[in-house]
Amino acid sequence: MADTSDRLYAELIAPIEGRIKGTVAGMLSDPEDAADALQNALFYIWKNLARIHRHPNPHGYILRVCISSAHDVARRRASRRRRETQLAFDPAASPADAGSAGAIRPTMAAIRKGIATLPKKQAQAVMLRLLDEKSFDLIGKALGCSEATARSHVSKGLARLREQLSSSGLHPAEG
């Protein structure tokens, strides 16, 4: 099987490797995002080599997988930025304050510091929920607990985080 997979990979990927990398890099300005998208796409392609080989246009299919992967990474990144901004700013702050990069850094630093002081499972649950957008079911599986316990870890962690930020004079957006 390994010889067949290696042959199929060389047959399908090698001829368009430059186009694959160029497509992903052209869609994502951040090199780390491009590397993540490329890795995700190549993993999917490797797992599905036999099926892709039977496709009437395998090179087109592979490029489509790469484009979809780049879109997924871009959506996750944009969603993460929105969530970080919601956490970082006081909802009563003026829009002019929200645009200031200087206003984000101290608040994000306080949020990271606050998360670091949470009990381990709560910190992990908060990070998985807010930054990685994981469902409570997946958080539970990652932490080795039930979905209900994962919800509890997230809820308690967010409550502690809000309390810490409020006591330090910061007021994160409710969410």
Image (tube, rainbow, N blue to C red):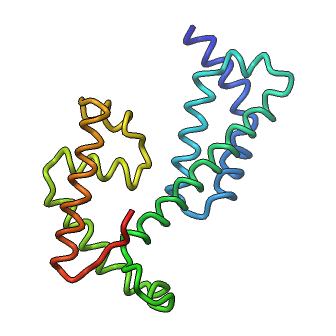
Q: Quadrant of the C terminus?
A: bottom left
* Side (left or right) of 86 relative to 45: left
Name the residue at the right extreme. 56
Q: Quadrant of the N terminus?
A: top right
How many numbered discs? Answer: 0
Residue visible at 16% across and 47% down? 120
Residue 152 at x, y percent in the picture: 24, 44
Is residue 75 or residue 168 the one in the foreground?
168
Is residue 112 or residue 165 the one in the foreground?
165
* Side (left or right) of 66 relative to 150: right
Residue 79 at x, y percent in the picture: 52, 59
Residue 38 at x, y percent in the picture: 58, 44
Compared to residue 55, the image places residue 174 above or below, namely below
Compared to residue 167, the image places residue 146 above or below, namely above
* Side (left or right) of 148 relative to 80: left
Compared to residue 80, the image places residue 18 above or below, namely above
Residue visible at 21% across and 52% down? 156
Residue visible at 71% across and 51% down? 23
Q: Residue 106 occupies which quadrant of the picture?
A: bottom left
Residue visible at 49% across and 66% down? 82
